[in-house]
Amino acid sequence: MEDFKLHNDEKKLLKIFQEAYDNKNITKLSVEGLAKNELMGSETKVMRTALWLSAEDKKLVNIIENKSKIAKLTEEGKKVVEKGLPERQVANYMIENDLKNIPIKELGNILDKSEVNPALGNLKKKKIAKIEKGNIIIENLQYEDKEENTLNKIKINEENKNSDLNNYNDEEKKLINNLQKRGFIAIEEEVDRAIELTEKGIEFIKNNIIEIKEEISQLTREHIVSGKWKDCHIRPYDAKIPSEEVYPAKLHPMTRIINDVKEVLIGMGFKEVKNPIVETEFWNFDVLFEPQDHPARDMQDTFFLRYPNKGEIPEMVKDIKSIHEKGMVGDKKISKGWRYEFDEEISKKTVLRTHTTVSSIKYLASLTDEEKEKPHKIFSIDRVFRNEAIDYSHLPEFYQCEGIILAEGVHFDNLIGLLKEFLNRLGFEQVRIRPAYFPFTEPSLEAEVFVEGRGWLELLGAGVFRPEVVEPLGINKPVLAWGIGLSRLAMLRWGLTDIRELHKNELNWLKKA
Ligand code: DAH
């Protein structure tokens, strides 16, 4: 043999190559195939052994890696292959029940709520039906659907281990892109590994008889007394070898983001406050100087509670009424106000909080006169709710983080400095600030961060609370405020393009994230 010593596993791997070469002149084998050979047994072992054999002192093999993108059906996608796309389910329903038209409202009985809007769009787009006055009127139920064909093809390719994205033509790729956005297909990266003999490796297996000794990892008295140890290979320890990946228990990625953000903010001297999920319109909107006819309060966005549909509001509502109607705090004129008739009954209505700004304002309202004299830095991280159709960038409940600084003499520049520091600490190196509008701050800003490959992304809203917001609470010092969407942050951190991925509890992803 050569002047280097081979480990038993190295001999085994070369032995497999020797046979393949002798029989069929083969010099390259897939890691997957090698792992199935009883001399190896696992991909980890193949890789570990190949690493040794490829090292500088031996160079008997090369490790070849081929990265590819593969298209797979998601759980939703699998269902759709069975039942058809939501628009197909509508068409089938109409065929089965011999209907020429149905009211849109009825779709709720056929489909999941989240599928209704996409189904409607596609019924129109695919010319299956037209929509008139809230009715779906069929045009063509016997249609062929390229998206469904593509889904079927993906299924078959998956069964044949043929899922490489390159197996699809440009038109199919476009369809796949759409289906990915609808959550039916996931694109994953796959690494194909193979081991190939080098010239030196080929020479080696041609010229050597490879003898595999019995391998022992425990030396016994028996081995020594009988002298058998001389014929055995005693396995050495190597603490650096690549090993099987283990996935210990860990926190959910969303929880980890929350903890990280908390740690950053606590490190910057903020204190956390918590508040309930159910709020009155008074706290969610009125105190923030959002007029009662503001479109954000509309059914579109806000979840209103049926039971209890009214909550208690404090005495202070008189002051809030006065600022909304006339811009007055007591007999002090702050601004023109909104000049409409403020309705306390609206203030009492219960909602699921639509933003965490409630927590900031409630904190300010809770301060005693003495406390108001001191500076304050607080934040909150909580779930907020908005009545939005679910898609790749929207969920009806998501996380926000919000904070304020109340102190004598702080101003807009301090806010910008603070936010840059905050975003830097979260790992965003490039931050830029743009003017913005929020009903409760003036001036207001939006902060954008630069993300490699994605460009500038808006992450955060902020501003100085308006006098109409703070004066009725008896606060006459500046309050700097900011709010950030945590789900967005989580998506960037984990490289997700679909917000639903965060909450699907897909084990494979959770293990690796
Ligand atoms: N509450 C705003 C939202 O949900 C976010 C926000 C913007 C919070 C500006 C703030 C702020 O404190 O100053 O869209």
Image (cartoon, rainbow, N blue to C red):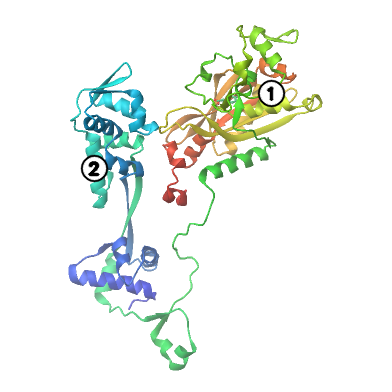
Answer left or right for 21 relative to 107. left
Mark 2 vs 1, N-terminal side: 2
Residue at image coords 43%, 50%: 507
Is residue 260 or residue 288 the one in the foreground? 288
Q: Specify the label residue 187 is tagged with.
A: none
Amino acid type, mark 2: Asn
- How far apart are labels 2 and 1 at the CA level? 57 Å
Helix, strand or loop status at disc 1: strand
Q: Compared with residue 361, is residue 328 higher up or lower down, i.e. above or below?
A: above
Q: Residues within 10 Å of mark 2 (few under 14, many from 20)?
A: some
Q: Compared with residue 299, is residue 94 higher up or lower down, i.e. above or below?
A: below
Q: Specify the label residue 479 is tagged with.
A: 1
Quarter of the picture holding the N terminus: bottom left
> Residue 322, how many percent across, how many down?
68, 10
The part of the image, by quadrant, that contains residue 30 is bottom left
> Residue 435, how many percent across, how many down?
55, 19
Q: Which residue is mark 2?
A: 152
Helix, strand or loop status at disc 2: helix
Amino acid type, mark 1: Val
Ligand 1 image-quadrant field: top right
Q: Residues within 10 Å of mark 1 (few under 14, many from 20)?
A: many
Residue 195 seen by the camera? no
Q: Compared with residue 460, is residue 336 higher up or lower down, i.e. above or below?
A: above
